[in-house]
Amino acid sequence: MARMSTVQDTASKDKLNASMANAQNAASNAAATAQHVAQNAAEQIRAHPAVQQAHQSFAQYMAQLDKELSKYPIINQIEAKTQVPKAYGALIAAAVFLSTIFVNTLALPVSNLVGWALPAYLSYRAIETPAPEDDKQWLTYWTVFGFFTFLESLALRPVLYYVPYYFPIKTAFVLWLQLPTTRGALIFHHSVMRPVINNLSGKRATYAPSTIPDSSTSPYTTQAPHEKLL
């Protein structure tokens, strides 16, 4: 009887070990299949035309940003010491800086600093250049930014009550206004501010906007659209 019990125990252990081995093999096969499917999906995503175009656009932007940052010796020195490409370092620093918008006590000054610092520097550069196009660009920006700041001063508290993430939204809007790739200040001025001012002043005119030149020739200067009175 003892031998029969031992044999049964051995058979049960063998069956249990076989079951565990089969389960492990099935799990390994499932993991390998899932990994293969994930790799195929990742390759399909990378091969998608939209993803490739976005990758090329990002690479061009980073190259342009690196070229612009190379003009400043201190940034080149920081890159040499840290071994971090200056374009990526600038993006990381910008991300860390913008993350402070979500801190209540810092949200207002940080959003205002975003709206003032870079445009102020580029306005100074525009004043020092003889070409009038960049003067128009930044004069338009300061007009729109001042109008927006005035409206904010009138209704900040109710806006904060009804819009919890107001300052991140404001910062994104200010960046849209000032970046040369979006030229939001020009769009806002010609589509919102000027019609309102014309209506208040009693002017009724029809304008035919000409083509806005491509801003890719310079990362920081754009030309305002010249419009003729019909």
Image (cartoon, rainbow, N blue to C red):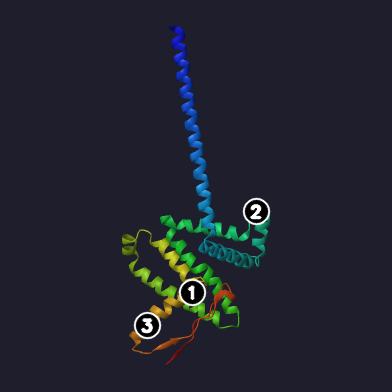
Question: Taking 218 as reference, is 2 above or below it?
Answer: above
Amino acid found under the numbered disc labelled 1: Arg
Q: Residue 216 appears at what percent x and percent y?
A: 57, 74
Instruction: Answer whether labels 3 and 1 touch (C-beta < 8 Å).
Output: no
Amino acid found under the numbered disc labelled 3: Pro
Q: Residue 19 appears at what percent x and percent y?
A: 46, 27
- Say whether disc 3 or disc 1 marks the residue closer to the N-terminus: 1
Amino acid found under the numbered disc labelled 2: Thr
- Mark 2 vs mark 1: in front: 1
Q: State the residue position of label 1.
A: 183
Question: Taking 99 as reference, is 116 above or below it?
Answer: below
How many numbered marks, from 0 up?
Answer: 3
Distance between the Cα atoms at labels 2 and 1?
A: 34 Å
User: Which of these two is toward me, 24 or 113?
Assistant: 24
User: Which of these two is toward me, 150 or 48?
Assistant: 48
Q: Residue 14 appears at what percent x and percent y?
A: 48, 21
Q: Residues within 10 Å of mark 1 (few under 14, many from 20)?
A: many
- Say whether disc 2 or disc 1 marks the residue closer to the N-terminus: 2
Looking at the rendering, in which quadrant would you find the C terminus? bottom left
What is the quadrant of residue 108 in the picture? bottom left
Distance between the Cα atoms at labels 3 and 1?
A: 18 Å
Q: State the residue position of label 2.
A: 82
Instruction: Tell me what residue is drawn at x 52 percent, y 53 percent.
Output: 42
Q: State the residue position of label 3.
A: 195
User: Can residue 221 be seen by looking at this rendering?
Assistant: no
- Say whether disc 2 or disc 3 marks the residue closer to the N-terminus: 2
Instruction: Tell me what residue is drawn at x 34 percent, y 85 percent.
Output: 199
Question: Taking 221 as reference, is 71 above or below it?
Answer: above
